Amino acid sequence: MPDQPNLLVLMADQLTAGALPAYGHRVVRTPHIDRLAGDGVVFDSFYCNSPLCAPSRFSMMAGQLPARIGAFDNAAEFSADVPTFAHYLRAAGYQTSLSGKMHFCGPDQLHGFEERLTTDIYPSDFGWTPDWTRFAERPGWYHTMDSVTQAGPCTRTNQIDFDDEVVYAARQKLFDIARGKDRRPFCMVVSMTHPHDPYTVPEPYWNRYRDDEIEMPRVRIAPADQDPHSRRIRHVIGLEQQTPTEAQIRAARRAYYGAISYVDDQVGALLATLEQARLASNTVVLLIADHGDMLGERDLWYKMSFFEPACRIPLIVHAPGRFRARRVRGSASLVDLLPTLAELGGARLDEPAAPLDGRSLVPALAGADTADEVLGEYLGESAIAPVVMIRRGPHKFVHCPADPDQLYDLVADPDERTNLAGRGDQAALVAAFRAEVERRWSLPDVHRAVLASQRRRHFVYGALRQGQFRPWDHQPLRDATKLYIRNDQELNDLEAMARFPRVD
């Protein structure tokens, strides 16, 4: 198909939309992302479908809600028979590659990508499986408040090591594509782990901000006044054991802003590489995240809830030659990415290989209104029963069989301070939302499926740890016999092929 553009998906981890200047933040400095937003299409009301790393990414890749594909938590297997946007684009003639994090669990570590340029930062086994039947026992492998209480500057971290490699490998791949003989369009996902906690960044990024310009959380809620799910989150992340001081909260937010600036610098390097490789004019660039971060709002941290800081994320689409700059007001979500990329790439979805819960956003990119609806599911740590969310128009409705309902009017109450679900004048709306939940989900069946999956994975993981353990972690192949200068190729020919742009 002659009009197939290249597709470059830039993904940040735990990046809340409200922390970006493109979404109104007045402190964080992101000149490269600002440029994408200034010339691109910005989705103002964009969401993840599950506020947790792996379920969010699996639903994004598959265009299906988490429960439909068994993406319950951070140790759920992503089944190899689930079609992803990488499969659809590959079938449409694309070369597909992934550099960085995708949190795939299970033996299939590619899921339609022809090539993974790096390994993943997180393990691919079942070791992080939660246990709803033993909620009181905090998992030793999950978040603690150390990320907040130890926030500050550093020289290196595990995450800097990873993201430096991710971006280097992606830039090298772009140059290889420009110099190579493969004329297929490309879809490349570059997925960084920043600004995910721990909240520590190298000093140059820490020093881009001052303590006196870091604003503190707007909404503070005492533990006794929190909803039950929020109290469970506090238990899981150890907030009752370590209560951060005001100075630690400020330091954590300062480091988070510094990490966003680090991400922005990597975005700038990748955009510069597109230009240098002469690929920019026919490349659609998308900036997304997997979920947000509470950053101390409502006295909560990290994710795991459907409050705005945890689940509202950026979507910026930059293709000035195709779509004029604009802002999209209607709500959309990550499950819409598969049909959007498929339509951009000319992949056929008239008879999809699996049911899709998302819709193409190409009409919205071209100026039409969106359907203005988002569905969400949370089935991971801190839950004891399925939590589901419906976002439509001004309203957000959150339902869990174990908890009181929550209803917010995000136009009148953007900070979600007032739960309207118990008010008599909202009874009809709450009843309508509850009836919709009944139609859309069989929550008892979902609950049973989660518990059964957790039991299976706990047993399998324990059994596989006996004797010789064979991990599923992706091992990138690097064949040294094909690198640089070797005697199976004429030196002058090799140097000529490696030089870009080529000399006639």
Image (tube, helix red, strand yellow):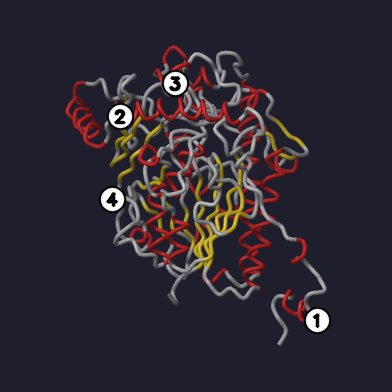
Q: Please tell me which of labels 3 and 4 falls first in the chain.
A: 3
Q: Quadrant of residue 188?
A: bottom right
In this view, the residue in front, 102 or 225, is 102
- The reply to whether dot 3 and dot 2 touch (C-beta < 8 Å) is no
Q: What type is the residue that disc 4 sits on?
A: Ala
Relative to 209, residue 82 above or below: below
Secondary element type, mark 3: helix
138 sits to left or right of 44: right
Q: Secondary structure at mark 2?
A: helix
Q: Nearer the viewer, mark 4 or mark 1?
A: 1
Going from the N terminus, do you reach mark 1 or mark 2 first? 2
Residue 118 relative to residue 77: left or right: right
Image disc number at residue 139: none
Q: Secondary structure at mark 4?
A: loop
Three-letter code for the amino acid on which mark 1 is drawn: Asn
Q: Reading the chain from its start, which is encountered first: label 2 or label 4?
A: 4
User: Which residue was labeled with disc 2?
Assistant: 445
**Residue at image mark 4:** 371
- Hey, what amino acid is under mark 3? Trp
Tag 3 residue: 132
Q: Residue at x 35, y 46 (%)?
A: 331
**Badge 4 density bin: few <14, some 14–19, many ≥20, Cα 10 Å:** some
